[in-house]
Amino acid sequence: MTPTAKSLSEQIKKAMEGVTQGEWSVDTDGSFGTKPRLYSEGDDGKLIAEFGNAEDPVTAQDEWEANGAYAALTQPANMLLILSALEDAERERNELRDKLAEAVKVIEFYANPDIYKPHPHGPAFDRRDVSFSARSFLSSVKGEGE
């Protein structure tokens, strides 16, 4: 089953409970072959993780450092910021969907030729052909054939 954004968001929030708080940074300044280490900034400077394994540093050093840099960016404050932005975007999308649904109902009214009758002498006597504009808009929103 493919996870949804909402389920992943909930899993990430749950996984963040109890993790080391504060800003995280990765130390990649060691000599060649030194495994990068992820630390929390602050008074305690806790070691969070060390990146690397028994691979030869000649082939793996860049990957170790990239993994450390990536992990440092996933610190709790950054993840909460991203998750908050996701929630805001989902809320805004839902609000826009609701507004669009209301607009479609109004436009459907004007698109119905039995309800809205253009001026009998043609569009030149109308300010504009509202029925045609409404039908055109509906076809672009709903797609052809709906």
Image (cartoon, rainbow, N blue to C red):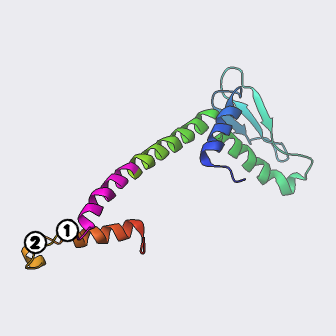
Q: Position of residue 114 (x, y in %)?
A: 22, 69
Q: Position of residue 29 (x, y in %)?
A: 74, 41
Q: Are the residues tagged 1 and 2 within 8 Å (C-beta)?
A: yes
Q: Position of residue 78 (x, y in %)?
A: 59, 38
Callout 1, which amino acid? Val
Callout 2, which amino acid? Asp
Secondary element type, mark 2: loop
Determine the residue positioned at 91% across, 51% down.
55
Q: Would you place residue 114 above or below residue 71 in this image? A: below
33 lies left or right of 121 = right
Real-space Cα distance between discs 1 and 2? 9 Å
Question: Which residue in the rendered view is the most extreme toward the right?
Answer: 54
Residue 79 position by quadrant: top right
Asked if residue 48 can be seen in this view, the reply is yes
Does the magenta-highlighted stretch encompass residue 105? Answer: yes
Q: Would you place residue 131 above or below residue 58 in this image? A: below
Asked if residue 75 can be seen in this view, the reply is no
Residue under circle 2? 126
Residue 107 position by quadrant: bottom left
What span is in magenta?
98-115
Q: Position of residue 70 (x, y in %)?
A: 69, 46
Q: How many other residues sit within 10 Å of disc 2, few (<14), some (14-19) or many (≥20)?
A: few
Residue under circle 1? 130
